[in-house]
Each structure stands twice: as C-alpha cells, then as structure tokens.
Amino acid sequence: MKWLGRIFLVALFVIVLWQAWQRLFVSEETRIRRAIAKMEQAIEDNQIVALADLIAGNYHDEHGLDKASLLAAVRSVRMQYAALLIHITDINIERAPDGSTSQATLIAKILTKRADGGQTEINAERVRLFLRQTDDGWKLTRIESPELKFD
C-alpha cells in the first residue's frame, strides 16, 4: 500500500513539473503552432467537436460564415471525401503588441480522395488565420484567403 502512495506522489510531481515547464518555457508562437496543428488534425480526422473547441464563439469571415456555419461547411466537405490530408508549410506568425491577438499566414496543401472513388486532387491555398488568446488557449476568430504573392 505504501508503494501506491509513492507512485501517486511521483505522478503528481511529474504533472506539476510538466505544467510549470509549459507555462515558463513554451513560447506563444509554439502554442499558436500547436493550435493550428490541432485544427488541421481535427479536420483530417473529421472531429467536428474537437474543431469547435478551437474556434471562438464570435468567429466570422469574409464569406459571411459564423462558427456554426463554418463547422457545417467543414462537415459537408469531409462527407464528400473518403480521405483528406492537409500539409501546412511556410507558417509566418505575427503577434499584436498587446499579445492577445495574432495572425498566421500559411500555405495549406490539401490532398483529397473522393468518397465516390473519383480521382485524387491536390490543391494549394495561401491562408491567413486570425487568432485570439483566451483562458483555454488560442482560438480562431477569422480566416482570409488573400491574394498574396508567394515569397
């Protein structure tokens, strides 16, 4: 019984140490990259609930989509494809001076295979994500597809 208590204390110590490490030594840029990677994985795995947790409640974009309609659009697109792979490259993150908002400009390369057995498609899109820091981490507030030159 004594060894169970020791294992519990060691586990608790490791958890506290890990949390301290994350708070002190992980940069906000790394946290933003992780949030983007979680969004990417949620879309690939068709996990709409996980994606909803990463989008701010006041989301809106240039196409008139709010959070609910964006999630419905993602679900609709995922239903059309049997497989979807997203590869994100060239991420450039810019944080606002107050540190509560940021922009991430990236290139998303998307490989899709239709559910009806159609041909595999490859698309590349330059995207700008606007994020806001909350108590739960970084949340997506807006997406733009700017006509930017490739550097």
Image (cartoon, helix red, strand yellow):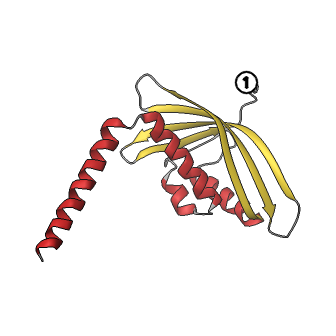
Q: How many marks?
A: 1
Outermost residue, front side: 3
Residue at 38% across, 38% down: 26
Residues 113 and 50: in front is 113
Relative depth, front residue between 12 and 40: 12
Q: Residue furthest bottom?
A: 1
Q: Is residue 146 above or below residue 1?
A: above
Q: Residue at x 24, y 51 (%)?
A: 16
Residue at 42% x, 32% y is 100
Left or right, 26 with reference to 17:
right
User: Measured from the top left, where is residue 109 in percent x and y?
Assistant: 73, 45
* Amino acid on which disc 1 is placed: Asp
Give the residue furthest to the left: 2
Nearer to the camera, 148 or 87 = 87
**Disc 1: which residue:** 151
Q: Quadrant of residue 3?
A: bottom left
The x and y percentages for residue 67 are 57, 51
Residue, far right? 119
Of helix, strand and loop, which one carries label 1?
loop
Quarter of the rendering occupied by the C terminus: top right
Q: For residue 98, what is the image quadrant?
A: top left
Q: Position of residue 89 (x, y in %)?
A: 66, 38
Alpha-carbon neighbours of circle 1 within 10 Å: few (<14), some, or many (≥20)?
few
Name the quadrant of the N terminus.
Answer: bottom left
